[in-house]
Image: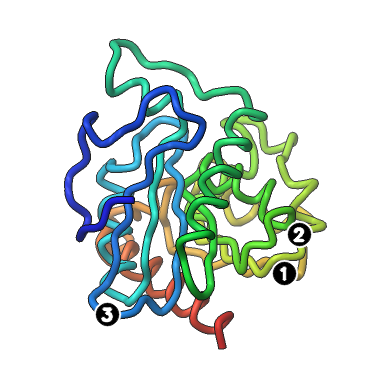
Amino acid sequence: MGNGQSAGIDAGQYRQGGETPEIVSDRPVGEPLASLILAHGAGAPMDSPFMQEITERLVRRGLAVHRFEFAYMAQRRVSEGKRPPNPQAELLQQWRAVYHLVRQQTAGRLAIGGKSMGGRMASLLVDELQADALVCLGYPFYAAGKPGKPRTAHLAELQTPTLIVQGERDALGDRDTVAGYRLSSAIELRWLVAADHDLKPLKRSGLTHDQHLDTAAEAVAAFLLAERG
């Protein structure tokens, strides 16, 4: 695995054709307080601005962050065109492979999670993997425009301690709509004022994206350290 402070990522860092995606690790100075495997969303890679910025903030708070890309996204780096996400079964198998590899090489508490789709795939596996915690940033509670068809059945039965950081006006799970869903008592929801799916607030709120990313990182760090306690 790589080791750095949120350095840029290029196609040369990937093993193509292997069963386990390449993993890029960012670690704090000294022993990490906890570790988190963080998967990207459906449309952006693991070094997107969002993923870079949240990783940097988490590392500054003493967490080790391990990022990877699903096969379809890694392939986008070496071929033209936007490939759609792999079938769910393949995404889950890639998650399993990454988790087991990182678990073998990581001492202490290890959480899993991700942005949007990456977090949703993690939520489908977290109890099976017996990870220490789950962290979701901008959870896609339903597909765009389909709040009446929530993707929450498994969330009602979730056993693993979970933190979901969500924008109040997220188009895939706004505050009023999510309030009507049945969720496990293991889930803690942290709502960000006037924020969208990328945790960006409305300008008229008087808040900035940087402030919301800081708040999200602080919430994640506090949650993982409390769970460690």
Q: Is residue 163 or residue 9 the one in the foreground?
A: 9
Residue where numbered disc 2 is placed: 158
Which of label 3 and label 1 is nearer to you?
3
Q: Determine the residue positioned at 25% across, 57% down.
A: 3
Tell me the tag on residue 143: none
Q: Determine the residue positioned at 34% across, 42% down.
A: 46
Could you tell me how far apart the alpha carbons at marks 1 and 2 are, in whole angstroms? 7 Å
Residue at the outermost front position: 104
Tell me the tag on residue 186: 1
- Residue 102 higher or lower than 73, as above or below: below
Tell me the tag on residue 30: 3
Q: Does dot 1 land on a helix, a strand or a loop?
A: loop
Could you tell me how far apart the alpha carbons at marks 2 and 3 are, in whole angstroms? 33 Å
> 10 Å neighbourhood of mark 1: few (<14), some, or many (≥20)?
some
Horizontal and vertical percent for residue 18? 45, 28
Q: Does dot 2 land on a helix, a strand or a loop?
A: loop
Counting residues from the N terminus, which is met first, the one under dot 1 or under dot 2? 2
Q: Does dot 3 land on a helix, a strand or a loop?
A: loop
Q: Determine the residue positioned at 45% across, 74% down.
A: 34
When asked about the image quadrant of residue 4, the answer is: bottom left
Q: How many marks?
A: 3
Tell me if label 1 and label 2 are in contact, CB under 8 Å: yes
Say what amino acid the circle numbered 1 marks.
Ala
Horizontal and vertical percent for residue 126? 66, 55
